[in-house]
Amino acid sequence: MAGILDTVDQRTQLVGENRLEILMFRLSGRQLFAINVFKVQEVLQLPKMTLIPQRHPVVCGVVNLRGQTLPVIDLSQAIGMRPLVPDERSTIIVTEYNRSVQAFLVGGVDRILNLNWESIMPPPGGAGRQHYLTAITKVDEQIVEVIDVEKVLAEIVPMSTRVSNERLGEPLLQQAVGREVLLVDDSSVALTQLRETLSQLGMRMHMASDGLKALNLLKKWADSGEDMTDKLLMVFTDAEMPEMDGYRLTTEIRNDPRLRDLYVVMHTSLSGSFNDAMVKKVGCDNFLSKFQPDRLVDVVLDRLRRE
């Protein structure tokens, strides 16, 4: 099972081609769930776990992997399903999101599958488990639900959106007041974080839940005669999204003469050196790991200095 990710480095070649690979797994039933392989460090049997006092209800305990202490999160319970019962046969998926590493307890790993983002659809509306999904797809006539891990983690350890007084005191930020930005992300948590941080700068925000919606909106504005660099100070885009990922969106922006001069920031929870390479390949102006309010303001300042 540990060998399931042996060729993960080769998979970075999928980025920029509007493709992804998902790791599929089950929780407490027959339903298949998935997360992006790029978020996964390894899959292994649950090591000896230590219980900790006053832990969050969905945190089973902690494990030590090569000197690193990781929380073990019951992913089934975290999304409102029946809790899993950990034992020596249990499986964990070790992941990295937003510069933090954690292990998710799952019912069992299925397989890795290579897909096109166009086959990944937004989840249906409504309450219930859909609240924790960013997308769905169909594999062998079975629905696969892609979990919004950012939301799960934010409910365990809430992220601050507060900008420091030191950053807010930058005189140049006065030029950001009233300026428009486009925020593109399939995670409602990420959009909220961006909106709450940028609202402290007095900025006006437009939002889109995937790259295709964002591209259509940009082209609509351009078709109406808008000068896009006058209209938008910058575009923040997630990397992985249904229908069109952020790398493909950036490529499409650079290929359209009306849009090509837009300042584009890749704003993602994905980690790894491949991100820097892909940002350069598709022509992003900046790269930012998610949920860093002061760093977000630094990127806005960088844009203002370039004007």
Image: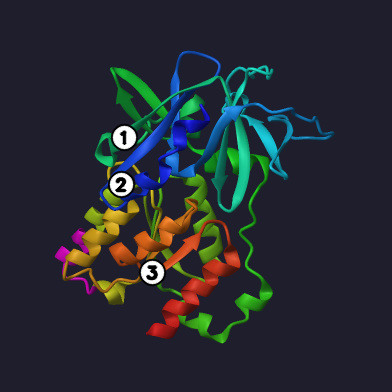
Q: Quadrant of residue 167?
A: bottom right
For residue 30, side relative to residue 254 (left or right): right
- The number of discs equals 3
Q: Residue at x 39, y 52 (%)?
A: 239
* Residue assigned mark 2: 14
* Residue assigned mark 3: 180
Colouring scheme, one of rainbow, by chain, secondary structure, one colour: rainbow
Q: Quadrant of residue 52?
A: top right
Q: Answer yes or no: is residue 276 visible.
A: yes
* Residue assigned mark 1: 114
Q: Position of residue 176 (x, y in %)?
A: 46, 77
- Mark 1 element type: strand
Q: Quadrant of residue 297?
A: bottom right
- Mark 3 element type: strand
Type of amino acid at the residue the image marks with label 1: Asn
C-alpha distance separating marks 2 and 1: 9 Å
For residue 102, side relative to residue 149 (left or right): right
Mark 1 or mark 3, which is nearer the start of the sequence?
1
Q: How many residues crowd mark 2 within 10 Å: few (<14), some (14–19), many (20+)?
A: some
